[in-house]
Amino acid sequence: MLHRPPSALAIAAATSALFTMDASANPRFSVENQADAKVKILVFSGNDSTCAIEEKSKPLKAGKSKNFGCYGGGKGRCKVRVMFKGTRVCGDANSSCKGTAIKVKDGGHLVLSNEDGCYVE
């Protein structure tokens, strides 16, 4: 019995499926700093239960916005810690990493402000 080699279309479809699955595993979100001070954004994997090793650490100036992403670990979210002069300023006791981080889902928008603290839209 002879086997035909896979067609280019079949290879392209399989490759596309792999990239689609990978994209869904890597959530993207934005952070908007409406506060009047520069902060540091620490991003953790969606499945990092202790927030021990950040994937990214970036400064965010007052009045600026920036897009971030992480390895979602099948959770469809990232965990984010916000620091101001070495002190955590964002966190939710019911959220993540013993209240030291906040969960942001794929497509989410984290807003930092002087009046309202941190919240996810």
Image (cartoon, rainbow, N blue to C red):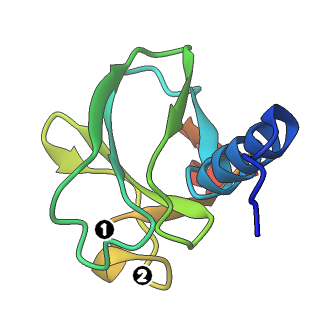
Please tell me which residue is depicted at 49% across the width and 78% down the height of the picture: 95
Does residue 116 appear to the left or right of 52 in the view shown?
Answer: right
92 relative to 93, above or below: above
- 22 or 3: nearer the eye? 3
> In the rendering, which numbered label is found on residue 93?
2
Please tell me which residue is depicted at 73% across the width and 42% down the height of the picture: 11
Does residue 29 appear to the left or right of 91 in the view shown?
Answer: right
Residue 31 placement (x, y as % from top left): 57, 34
85 relative to 20, above or below: above
Q: CA distance from mark 2 to mark 1?
A: 8 Å
Residue 79: image quadrant is bottom left
* Crowd band around label 2 with a 10 angstrom C-alpha radius: few (<14), some (14–19), many (20+): few
> In the rendering, which numbered label is found on residue 108?
none
Q: On the image, numbered disc 1 is attached to which residue?
A: 100
* Crowd band around label 1 with a 10 angstrom C-alpha radius: few (<14), some (14–19), many (20+): many
* Residue 108 visible somewhere in the drawing: no
Q: What kind of residue is marked 1?
A: Thr
Q: What kind of residue is marked 2?
A: Ala
Residue 85 placement (x, y as % from top left): 16, 34
Residue 103 placement (x, y as % from top left): 53, 65
- 38 or 67: nearer the eye? 67
Please tell me which residue is depicted at 57% across the width and 62% down the height of the picture: 77
Please tell me which residue is depicted at 50% across the width and 61% down the height of the picture: 72
Secondary element at tag 2? loop
Residue 16 placement (x, y as % from top left): 75, 42
Label located before the other in sequence (2 or 1): 2
45 relative to 23, above or below: below
Does residue 47 appear to the left or right of 94 in the view shown?
Answer: left
